[in-house]
Each structure stands twice: as C-alpha cells, then as structure tokens.
Amino acid sequence: MTAADAAFSRSLGINPMKYCSRCVVPGMSAVPLTFDDKGVCSGCRVSDTKATIDWDKRGRLLRELVDEYRTSSNYDIVIPVSGGKDSYYQTHVATKELGLKALLVTYHGNNYLPEGEYNLQRMREVFDADHIIVRPSVEALKKMNRLGFRIQGDMNWHAHCGIFSAPIQVALRYKVPLIMWGEHGFLDLGGMYSLNDFVEFTAKHRLEHLLRGYDWYDFTDEGLEKLGRPEAKEGLTAKDLLWAKYPSDEEIDSIGVRGIYLGNFVNWDGNSNAELVAAKYDWKASEVPFERTYRLASNLDDMHENGIHDYLKFVKFGYGRATDHSCKDIRSGRMTRDEGIAMVRKYDHVKPRRDLERWLTYVDMSEEEFDRVCDTFRDPRVWRIEDGYWVKDNVWGEPSQYGKAHVA
C-alpha cells in the first residue's frame, strides 16, 4: 500500500492501522501476523494453544531427539547464547536436565551493558560448558552500525547477522550437528507458525525474515555498488566480514547440521525463565531503567537494543518494545489489556536521549542526519504528515502527533 492508497483508505473511513482486540499488537507489525473474525491476532491464538499441549510428552520428545546426538568424544550440542535470561535457561535445560556436553557460542557486538557482561562471563562458572565468543573488530562494527542505519534503517543489523551466522560456523568447525535455539521469535510474537509444526531453523528464514533480505555481501563496497548506494561505502571487504558469512548448503549437509527451538518442547515464558535463572545462578537484570520499556530483563547484550534499535522500530512501524513486552505479558496473564495500553502510551513514542547521544558519539554522526535518515524509513501505511508533523493512529483509538517531519 502506498501513501496515496493509505490516504484513500482513510477518506473512505477505513483505518489502515488495526490492533488486536485482546493484546496490543498492530496489524502493521515487524513480524507477519493475521487477525481472525473476532479481531484476535495469530500471536494470541498460538499462545492459547500452550494450555492444550502435553508438555511432559514434549519433554520426552526432546530427550529422545537429543539422545540421537549424544557422543562419547565430542560436544553433544551447540547453544547460541547472549548471556541473557533465555540463554541461561537454554543452557540449564541442556546441561542440568538433559546432561549434555554443550558448546556455547556468543556473537559479541561490543556494546554489552555491565550486567550483561557479568552474566555472559559467569556462564562458564555456573555451567560445565566451553564457550566461544566471536568479537568482530570495533572498526568494522562501527562501520556496520552506520551502514545498517543508512541502508536498512537498522543499526543493529550486524547483530542479527552475527547471532544467526557465527553458531552455524562453529557447529561446522567442531562437527556438532545439533544446535538448540531458544524460542522462535516470529512464532512467539506473531504466531507465524503453530507450536505443532515443530519448526526448525532454516537459511531461508534467516535471510528473508531475520536479515530482512540483506546479507553480508550487500555491505561491502562491491555490494553497495550493486545496490546502487555507492555513496554509503565504508571500505569494507569480504575479509572484514568473515564472521557474518553463512555456510553453503554443501557444508551444512556434510555435517547434517540442524537447529531446533527449545520453545517447541517446553512451556516457554521469558518472565519465568528470568525468575528461575536469577534464583539458581544469580543472573542479574538491568539495575538502571530503560528509556523505552518497562522490563529490566531483556536485551542486556546491547546497550543500544532497547534504545536506538527500538526507536527505529517505532519510526518504521509505529510501535516499539513496550508493545512487544505488553503483548507477551497480556497473553501470559501477567497484565490486562488496559495496563498494556498504558505501557504503550508511556514508552513507545519516547526518543531515547541517553541512548541516542551515546550512539551518535559511537558512530560519529549528527542528530540532524539521524532524524533526516529516520524519516526516509517511515511506513506510509502507518504515518502521515499533518501541518509539518508526523501523525499516526493509536491503540487507544485516537491519533497523536509525534515530532516534526524532516522530509517534504
């Protein structure tokens, strides 16, 4: 839908923005979702099915699956970890409950919060597991921050690429066929798949959804020429992005690597995960409140994730992490929809001053350029300009003005 289409819809009294009648997720979501005839989103419907699943049986299925990969002379499993609450929970299940010899793999994007770095380093102390941390050069990361922002509207694109590439590289290098991820994010948030699908990690999902259609080669000078964006060149070559390369099908087939999601086998709940690992392993949440959400237990592996990265989501789609967190808490019964709307109203629109100033210094960029580039990524199905200001329709039923437009 173009801006003209969206305006025409409004002239007919049709609102292009639609919100779930049970949680607070908008139809213009960063993850694919649908609404049923009662206006309930697919994320809520898939969440409902958790109450009908025999989780003890799922646990037995998981044990039978991993038993096929136990070895006497190698790692049994690779676990991608950030050091967050869910990483601790994955490793707890694998090592303490299933008795597996795990190899932990972390992509380190250089901007951990102090609590996140503490949690990450502590994993080798509280779990009997070896740990490989992949840390790209700071120079390359700063360039990737600028390129991700200017080309794709996501300064954290490098993190998505690293997180979903480095563990597969390590699995191949150490010849470990089984990788265990946490929850499937698109299933958990938007109901993209059923929990009965037992969906597994694929190269197609990585490229088309997790990386939004871009791959590492698009950010080299040669790749930017092909994209028609030569002015954005940062001097990156293929050798600067070795950590981002996804192995070939032939390489993956040679080891038989597969990636399962723990969320298909246990009744996944991020809040419960945080409570368990805090009690068992002294895992720590953030001690300082975030500017754009109320939860303190998420995304401690990147100080910009809950700030700039999430603000860009609001710029593009008109909602942010407070919406995501409220949806999950409404579905799990920890929050009412009215309470969720209050969180959205309080946090989603906030331009994070502390985080913005920190990131602009990190990448040597002016706020004027930041605002100008941001506006080029605003989705016309969400945003309209009225009297020189950005306006969108809200989950509480009224439109609001959200800052001066920096484009004509």
Image (cartoon, rainbow, N blue to C red):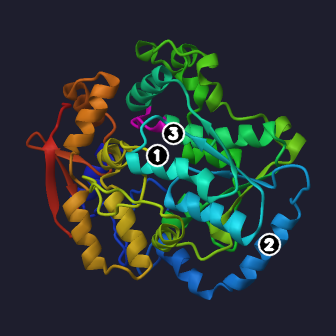
Residue at coordinates 46% horizontally, 72% vertically from top-left?
275
Name the amino acid, label 2. Answer: Arg
Question: Which quadrant of the figure contains the C terminus?
Answer: top left
Label whose residue precedes the other's in the sequence (2 or 1): 2
Q: Which residue is mark 2?
A: 63
As drawn, the label of residue 159 is 3
Badge 3: how crowded within 10 Å, few (<14), some, or many (20+)? many
Name the amino acid, label 1. Answer: Glu
Most frequent secondary structure within the magenta stretch: loop
Badge 2: how crowded within 10 Å, few (<14), some, or many (20+)? some
Quarter of the rendering containing residue 293:
bottom left
Q: Is residue 203 left or right of residue 274?
A: right
Between disc 2 and disc 1, the foreground one is: 1
Q: CA distance from mark 2 to mark 3?
A: 31 Å
Q: Which residue is mark 1?
A: 117
The part of the chain drawn in magenta is 152-157
Residue at coordinates 87% horizontally, 44% vertically from top-left?
255
Label whose residue precedes the other's in the sequence (3 or 1): 1
